[in-house]
Image (cartoon, rainbow, N blue to C red):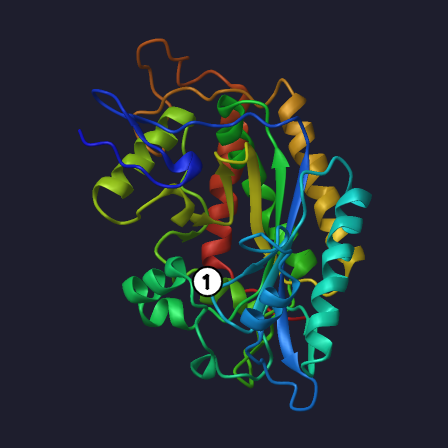
């Protein structure tokens, strides 16, 4: 088997039958937030390209890029990120500092900053792709699916101590994805159309082959096997291209919640971050979230070597059933605005 080498934690170490993905343990319940901001022309209110110039202006001398302000797919988007934080207040203060830098650089170009899951009327076909190889390759491979990703979200990372904790926590968080989306839904409009949905963003993003609800896995070994399958079949080039609504992030040693629509204020971001941190901390320290038993099929938990009996209640079997129910409900339901 040939080793597949990507960036940082995307290094795949081959074994005889499966790959190993290094997971960098994180301090328990550490916190990181990513906030995708729209650049809007203050006169027309349309999305407007400006990220290249703004990020160059605020780049520290001698650095390749700003440490906490980044390019996104479109030149009308800037993502600001925190460092590793311990509290929500610390994360909010971190975002506020970077926000002030970006806002000042945008203002003298006639641009303002806003955030919602989608822009209400700008046509995605008018937008410029960021001049970074990663995004150019994405558009080349995905074409129309990638070009129309004029969407904006908030992502929350919460630290996990070990890889064997990560997948059970992802499974447990699945039952809360509807709650996070209900709290953050902010994208009823798409290219000037009232979609009748509270979150059009989720439906746009779900079109990507590796986006949407996470595949239900029993543990880190199954995650490694699944990633090996995707990479070996050229479905993805690295683990970073799996954009589930909640996913483990091996490089950061976190579980990342990606379901939320863009939020307009730091207070709202703080609320979502606090809920994320509390839930992950609860699952990380709870004895009821443990390694699930092996399954013969996606719908059963049968006897295998060293496995618990199928009839026995296991700590994560309850969470897994709840997660599957959430998956089914979300796929069959439509988010209607009220």
Q: Say whether residue 137 is left or right of residue 326.
A: left
The quadrant where residue 161 appears: top right
Tally of marks:
1
Q: Say whether residue 233 is left or right of residue 76.
A: left
The quadrant of the image that shows the C terminus is bottom right
Query: Is residue 242 visible from the viewing direction of this image?
Result: no
Would you name the residue on which mark 1 appears?
A: 205
Secondary structure state at the residue bearing disc 1? helix
The quadrant where residue 304 appears: top left
Q: Nearer the viewer, residue 17 or 183?
A: 17
Q: Say whether residue 282 is left or right of residue 145.
A: right
Residue, far left: 1
- Indicate the position of residue 44 as horizontal and vertical percent values: 65, 90
- Indicate the position of residue 263 as horizontal and vertical percent values: 69, 62
Q: Residues within 10 Å of mark 1 (few under 14, many from 20)?
A: many
The quadrant of the image that shows the N terminus is top left
Residue at figure coordinates x 42%, y 46% from the top left: 240
Q: Nearer the viewer, residue 10 or 222?
A: 10
Residue, far top: 306
- Indicate the position of residue 132 as horizontal and vertical percent values: 42, 62
Residue at figure coordinates x 37%, y 21% from the top left: 294
Residue, far front: 62
Q: Nearer the viewer, residue 141 or 6?
A: 6
């Amino acid at each position: 088997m040939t080793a597949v080498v990507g960036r940082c934690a995307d290094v795949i170490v081959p074994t005889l039958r499966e790959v190993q993905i290094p997971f960098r343990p994180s301090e328990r319940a550490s916190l990181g937030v990513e906030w995708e901001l729209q650049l809007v022309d203050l006169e027309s209110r349309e999305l407007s390209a400006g990220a290249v110039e703004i990020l160059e202006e605020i780049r520290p001398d001698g650095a390749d890029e700003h440490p906490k302000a980044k390019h996104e797919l479109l030149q009308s988007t800037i993502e600001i990120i925190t460092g590793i934080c311990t509290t929500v207040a610390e994360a909010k203060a971190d975002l506020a500092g970077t926000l002030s830098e970006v806002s000042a650089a945008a203002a003298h170009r006639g641009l303002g900053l806003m955030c919602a899951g989608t822009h209400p009327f700008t046509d995605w076909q008018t937008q410029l792709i960021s001049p970074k190889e990663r995004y150019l390759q994405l558009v080349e491979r995905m074409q129309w699916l990638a070009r129309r990703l004029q969407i904006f979200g908030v992502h929350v990372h919460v630290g996990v101590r070990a890889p064997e904790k990560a997948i059970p926590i992802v499974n447990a968080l699945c039952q809360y994805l509807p709650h996070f989306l209900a709290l953050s839904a902010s994208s009823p409009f798409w290219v000037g159309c009232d979609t009748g949905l509270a979150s059009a963003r989720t439906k746009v993003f779900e079109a990507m082959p590796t986006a949407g609800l996470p595949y239900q896995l029993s543990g880190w070994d199954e995650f490694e096997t699944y990633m090996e399958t995707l990479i070996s079949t050229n479905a993805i080039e690295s683990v970073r291209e799996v954009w589930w609504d909640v996913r483990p992030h091996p490089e950061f040693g976190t579980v990342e919640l990606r379901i939320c629509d863009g939020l307009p204020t730091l207070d709202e971001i703080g609320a979502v971050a606090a809920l994320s941190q509390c839930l992950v901390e609860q699952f990380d320290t709870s004895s009821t979230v443990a390694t699930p038993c092996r399954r013969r099929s996606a719908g059963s938990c049968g006897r295998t070597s060293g496995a618990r009996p199928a009839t026995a209640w296991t700590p994560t079997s309850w969470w897994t059933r709840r997660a599957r129910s959430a998956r089914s409900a979300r796929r069959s339901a439509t988010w209607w605005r009220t």
